[in-house]
Amino acid sequence: MDSVRAVSPGRVNLIGEHTDYNGGMVMPAALSVHLEAELTPREDDIVRISAEPFGMLHERTLEDPAKDHWSDPAVGALREARALGLIGHGADLLIASTIPAGAGLSSSAALIVTVLKAARMLAKSDMSDTEIAVAARRVETDYIGVPVGIMDQMAVAIAQPGEAIALDTATLDYELVTLPKGYSIEVIHSGVTRQLSDGRYKERKEECDAARIAFGRDDICTLNPAKIAENTEVSDVIRRRALHCATEHRRVKAAVDALAGGDIATLGALMIASHTSMRDDFEMSVPLIDALVDDAVALGAVGARLTGGGFGGCIVACVAEDQRDGWLEGLLVKHPEARFIDRIARAT
Ligand code: GLA
């Protein structure tokens, strides 16, 4: 049978962390690192995955439960494609990716979205990219069992490399956002790897669920931060988790305005404030990443912050293009454990 190919970018989140399952805004951007999949349908329920980053061939069946294995997103995506009527049986998948795994750059969402887009092509279906993203999230939450929000799937399904989207995760309305002129967005890996399935992401999700119950509403991002701060009935931990969500949501909105007005100093200040909130209120950073962010700013970035689910992975920094080479060299000399991953800049 004929093969189909699809490709999706990795994503970096510029601002808006852990707001996407609390009714808030996010602003991710698509990277140039990407994942490509070639799908060849089969007549049986076998899934054969050959994945370059892992240098191996792996065989599963569509009936296999998730088993905390790198092939889970691919198997889950094919199960979802079958449930949606896009494919009848299993498939051979050839995967090639330049998105580092465990870096918080959505390698898993890219794999699921890419397989679903390939299946959509095969079926000549008119499913929209938003519908693909929603289906991809189901694979993460229902099959793999990680209670993620919708940011990553929307970002990799919709944005083109170098494009950012301001996404309202409550409605899935989004607008494309232009990156700042004369500045680049730098993605640096801290050297600390992590997996969303390691339990700490889920712990934060559960704390947010407790905050929803305590404050009596689902969209804790839209609560007034002053009202959260003065509430003495909830525990200190739950109050700080809610405070992060509510202030982060406002920072994303302010960042969208700052970008629209070309106010890069404000954008940078918002990124730095976002990191402080993630470090102190949401407690999702680690000391090595705090040091990397501090040094990124000390060396001249207008803003820098941890990006993604937390507890490891990458930082994202906004740096003036004419300072970028010296900035990067200085940062990597100070942090030999870190490594450059990608940069995106406005095309014109
Ligand atoms: C991971 C999840 C997203 C989002 C971020 C934190 O990337 O997949 O849904 O919650 O963490 O902002």
Image (cartoon, grey):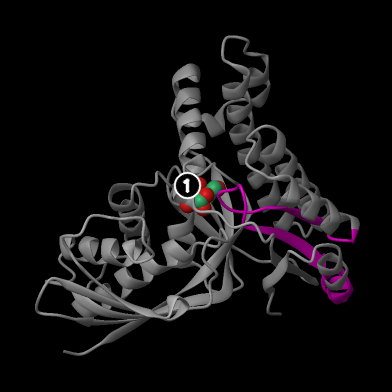
List the single residue furthest toward the bottom. 2
Left of 44 or right of it: where is 228? Answer: right
In the image, residue 301 sits, relative to residue 49, either above or below, namely: above
Q: Residue at x 55, y 45 (%)?
A: 25
Q: Determine which quarter of the picture holds residue 330.
A: bottom right
Tag 1: amino acid? Asp
* Label total for image: 1
The foreground one among 346 and 110 is 110
In the image, residue 342 sits, relative to residue 222, either above or below, namely: below
Residue range (magenta): 299-328
The foreground one among 227 and 295 is 295
List x then y, in percent, for residue 80: 23, 60
Look at the image and tell me in which quarter the C terminus lies.
bottom right
The foreground one among 47 and 156 is 47
List the single residue furthest toward the left. 43
Look at the image and tell me in which quarter the N terminus lies.
bottom left
Left of 285 or right of it: where is 79? Answer: left
List x then y, in percent, for residue 115: 32, 72
List x then y, in percent, for residue 232: 63, 10
Residue behind mark 1: 198
Q: Which residue is drawn at 72% across and 57% down?
A: 259
Q: Can I make out residue 302 in this image?
A: no
At mark 1, the secondary structure is helix
List the single residue furthest toward the top. 233
Dot 1 alpha-carbon crowd within 10 angstroms: few under 14, some 14 to 19, many 20 or more? few
List x then y, in percent, for residue 9: 50, 72
Q: Residue at x 79, y 66 (%)?
A: 336
Tell me, yes or no, whether the highlighted magenta stretch contains residue 309: yes
Tell me, yes or no, whether the highlighted magenta stretch contains residue 301: yes
